[in-house]
Amino acid sequence: MTNHVLPLEPIPLEPIKSGFLKSMRLMKQSYHSPLEHGQNLRREHGNAVMQKVGKMRIVHLFGAEAHRLCLMNPGQIFSNKKAWDMIIGRIFPNGLMLRDGDDHRYHRRLMQAGFKSKPMQGYLGQMIPQVRSAVKQWSVQADGKMLAYPAFKQMTLDLAATIFLGMDLGDDARKISRAFEVTVAASMPRIPMAIPGTLLWQGIRARQTMCDFFLPQVAEKRLGDDQDLFSLLCRATDEEGQGYTDQEIVDHMIFLMMAAHDTTTSTLTSITYALARHPEWQTRLEQERQSLGVEALAYADLDKMVEADWVIKEALRMYPPLSTLPKFSNEAFEYEGHLVPAGAMVMTYPIHTHYMTEYWDKPREFDPLRFSPERAEHKRNAFSWVPFSGGAHMCIGLHFADMQIKLVLFEMLKKFSWSVAEGYEMPVQQSPISKPRDDLPIYLMSKT
Ligand code: HEM
């Protein structure tokens, strides 16, 4: 006999009751420490929590299944565009992440031209001398002590100029670097008002400087045969021979530079910290590097850096550069028996899921072996490890990031060992993009 169980009607989610001061405290905590914020909310209210801030409804969903729902986006319940437009739309309008549905699919398909294995091999070849010279500079400057975060930030910025733009910026270098830095800094401003003097105002002007610089170069790049990302996007076409417009190329380039920059800097910084705290892993990675038996990293070597891969994954688990992912509900939907209304900002929390004991053994411990085939904790649920998001909007640059990080690690391990002061713990600002509050002071010991 079949046991018929009638599905229960989902219960409409109601906003939690909090006065003005508590709402402000929660907002502040969500900005400074999304992990703690998420853990507190979930402990008090469960896996679905709604807050009302002014007229806006913010819904927090917890757990790997929340990521599965929001990232797989069945029936296009969620809009990425509406969510991200509210956050970074003034400075990065029309970036790939700020598009939905067919429009997003079309733009993403064209962009793949810049991320196939042939151009990737070219980028690697170009990056090697630049990374080497940057790492060498550290030893020149160093009295042993170095601030890791700004060093990586400078390196990724210089790499973006060559790999992404394919140009020696010459006299424009300072102007463009500065404009780029301002757009990135202004991408998620605390004061979201564009009045003279505010960061957002400066960001909008800096964006214009970048547009004015890139736009006139599109025609020439379309005709040339250069292999930098900018040129590849200029020439990318679909099956019908249709390509991006000039303005679309510029919008994509400005977004790409931002998307690649702080995220990779953040990851390199947290890996450096973790390896300084765990010298046994530095030794393991150095042994793995030596076992490759090469002076210069080749594209085929990337897959052989298996233990480096576990370390990168573990650093991304503990310190995901994007700790939260916003989506906007186009229509009402159900999550774990709750009916979530249309028109809400829906937040999921990679950082929270990455610390849930339901999926991870001792999640506060740095333990790269959890990603080994024997333990494979990340396979307990396909959506428990989501530093690169998932579904249609999964990071298009994840292999690029992996390649760049492995190259920097390879060159660093060859030249140095490094440590942090006894008892040091990195103070992390988890949002908007994870970074150390103190720039991560490390001590470099030269091997040559
Ligand atoms: C460790 C480094 C990186 C991390 C952790 C990271 C993380 C992410 C995440 C979480 C998203 C999805 C956001 C969403 O669901 O709305 C995303 C999207 C994106 N990322 Fe990355 N990213 C990294 C590096 C890069 C690099 C190096 C590039 C370019 C070379 C890049 C380009 C993009 C683009 C274009 C998108 C939008 C994809 C789409 O909407 O289809 N990212 N990234």
Image (spheres, rainbow, N blue to C red):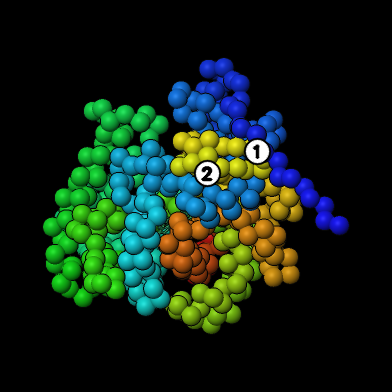
At label 2, the amino acid type is Thr
Q: Is residue 445 left or right of residue 265?
A: right
Residue 243 in view here: yes
Say left or right for 290 vs 169. Answer: right
User: Residue at position x 38%, y 35% from top?
Assistant: 189
Question: In terms of image quarters, where does ligand 1 lie?
Answer: bottom left
| Residue at 60% in and 42% down | 334
- The residue sitting at 18% across, 69% down in the picture is 222
* Residue at position x 24%, y 43% in the image: 206
Q: Position of residue 352 (x, y in %)?
A: 62, 44
Q: Look at mark 2 in the image and give the residue it sits on.
A: 324
Instruction: Tell me if residue 26 comes above or below residue 73 in the rendering.
Output: above
Percent position of residue 176, x then y: 23, 51
Q: Secondary structure at mark 1?
A: loop
Which amino acid, mark 1?
Answer: Pro
Q: Residues within 10 Å of mark 1 (few under 14, many from 20)?
A: some
Which badge, 1 or 2, comes first in the chain's sequence? 1
Q: Secondary structure at mark 2?
A: loop
Would you call the spot at circle 2 few (<14 residues within 10 Å), some (14-19), or many (20 or more)? many
Of the pair 357 and 416, the residue shown nearer to us? 357
Q: Is residue 427 visible?
A: no
User: Mark 2 CB in 8 Å range of ligand 1?
Assistant: no
Quadrant location of the N terminus in the rendered image: bottom right
State the residue position of label 1. 10
- Horizontal relation, residue 241 to residue 281: left or right: left
- Could you tell me residue 282's position as x and y percent? 61, 64
Q: Residue furthest right?
A: 1
- In this rendering, the answer to whether 343 lies above or below 169 is above
